[in-house]
Image: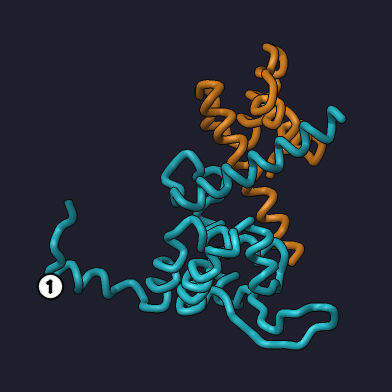
Amino acid sequence: MGISSNKKIEEYAKEMPWELRRAIEALNDDLRLAVFFVLLKHGELSFSQIMAELEIPRKDSSILSHHLKILEKGALIKNEFAKKEGMDSHSFYDLTEFGEDVLNGLMDTLAVPRLAGEPIEPLKKLLYQVGSTVSEKAFKEATK
Amino acid sequence: MNLTHQEAERMEYLLGKSRLSYLNREEESELRYLVTKENPSAKDGSMDELIKLGLILVGLYFLSKALSEK
């Protein structure tokens, strides 16, 4: 059960700069974290490319739109319109400079000597998933 | 990063093997050595803990590399 907010809680919570608070809230979700790292890994991608990379079924496209908007509101990603040869989509997503700064900051808190301390759980979970995929691939390739 | 490139690749292989097959005793010792070299606080951890930490480390390296190449 949560604690009802009060004046003191609000006072302390406001000490966190509003931009950072919004960015942290935007990252507090597995799908949004995944989108964030997909864009980090691949750079600029269209909506359809993000759907394909994350294997999101077409019927759930509105859910992805919703989460992309939250990431945009958090100023972590940007949505730009451009015409590109050989592509149907004219709408592309990429990380903002602020998004990359936030990620660098998070990575610093996860510096290896501190891993046994208190890493940020959703990010730790994602790193574990990425590590599992990379390692399994390495083993499969070595035993081909 | 305390591991050499070859050691990091070996750690990836051993972690992949631990997930898709099984490690023999020698391989377990080798994995313990590699994870501990990168994070000495893992020295007395169980094999499950070492594998979990090792996978997080691999994920961290992979994403850090992606970030630096961007």
Q: Give amino acid for label 1.
A: Lys
Query: Which quarter of the picture shows residue B63?
Result: bottom right
Query: In the picture shown, does residue B27 fall above or below B50?
Result: above
* Chain label for disc 1: A
> Residue sitting at 57 percent across and 42 percent down?
A128
Q: Mark 1 sits on what residue? A: A7
Residue A85 location, x and y as percent?
Answer: 84, 82
In the rendered image of the structure, the colour used to display chain A is cyan
Q: Which residue is at the front of the view, A57 or A116?
A: A57
Q: Which chain is orange?
A: B
> Residue sitting at 20 percent across and 72 percent down?
A10
Q: Which residue is at the front of the view, A98 or A55?
A: A55
Direction top: furthest residue: B25
Direction front: furthest residue: A59
Q: Which residue is at the front of the view, B65 or A90?
A: A90
Query: In the picture shown, does residue A84 fall above or below A9?
Result: below
Residue A73 location, x and y as percent?
Answer: 46, 79
User: Left of A133 or right of it: where is A111?
Assistant: left
Q: Secondary structure at mark 1?
A: helix
Q: For the N terminus of chain B, which image quadrant?
A: top right
Q: For the C terminus of chain B, which image quadrant?
A: bottom right
Residue B56 location, x and y as percent?
Answer: 58, 41
Q: Label 1 crowding class (10 Å Cα cut-off): few <14, some 14-19, many 20+? A: few
